[in-house]
Amino acid sequence: MLTSLVRRLAGEPRRFAAAVCLGLAVLCALQVLRPHSPPTRAVWVVAHDVDGGAPLTAHDVRPERLPLRLVPRGALLVRERVVGRLVAAPMRAGEPVTDVRLLEPSLLAALPEPGLVAVPIRLADGPAAAALTRAGDLVDVLGTTGDDSAPTTQVIAAKLTVLAVPARDSGQDDGGAGLVVVAATDAQAARLAGAAATTRLSLVLLRR
């Protein structure tokens, strides 16, 4: 039936041309009405909650395509290497991995002595203390327990070199606020990790 209709229209050039134009118009209208998928970008997101201070593994991240409007500034694309890089601060499952969440590989290369590790610590007095600290500074890390009426303060780790202040280095005051990365021995890193759960940490700047 369709074949006979086409033959009939072909015998009448004007009707055939009109039918072709009508068909093209219908196709164009359907194309316009079809909802357009928003542009996306493939980025790395965290597959589950991760703690700060640990290197990312292949099981910690997954690639995901996000609409451009949901891709945060500094998000790391799937073509960029993230496995093995140190997490600067805790992250929640599904959170896009951004540059301020990871320590740069150059930090580890900049460790002043062999056998040291890069340790992120979060300060109780937050961005105010971090704002006074710069990469290369020598600091003592203090831990304070008790309430304001009877505080007890002790040195948790002494003479540490500051490697980075992530929030200020990135120009963003977000999850990196109050975070400082220091070079420490394994023993100092263990003391810092234990103290972070029970004490309020602060810094004392030392003269080199």
Image (cartoon, rainbow, N blue to C red):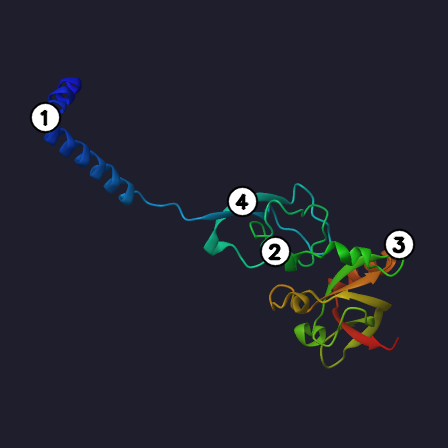
Q: Which mark is residue 64?
A: 4
Q: Which residue is mark 1?
A: 12
Q: Nearer the viewer, mark 3 or mark 2?
A: 2
Label 3 packing within 10 angstroms: few (<14), some (14-19), many (20+): few
- Residue 157 in view here: no
Disc 4 element = strand
Label 4 – label 3 distance at C-alpha: 36 Å
Left or right: 205 in relation to 78 = right
Label 2 – label 1 distance at C-alpha: 65 Å
Q: Which residue is mark 3?
A: 115
Q: Which residue is mark 2?
A: 98
Q: Earlier in the sequence, mark 4 or mark 3?
A: 4
Badge 2 vs badge 1, beta-carbon distance below 8 Å: no
Amino acid residing under circle 4:
Glu
Q: Earlier in the sequence, mark 3 or mark 2?
A: 2
Amino acid residing under circle 3:
Gly
Residue at x 75%, y 70% (from the top left corner): 201
Q: Earlier in the sequence, mark 1 or mark 4?
A: 1
Q: Earlier in the sequence, mark 2 or mark 1?
A: 1
Label 1 – label 4 distance at C-alpha: 55 Å
Disc 3 element = loop
Query: Residue 208, image x and y in percent?
Result: 89, 75
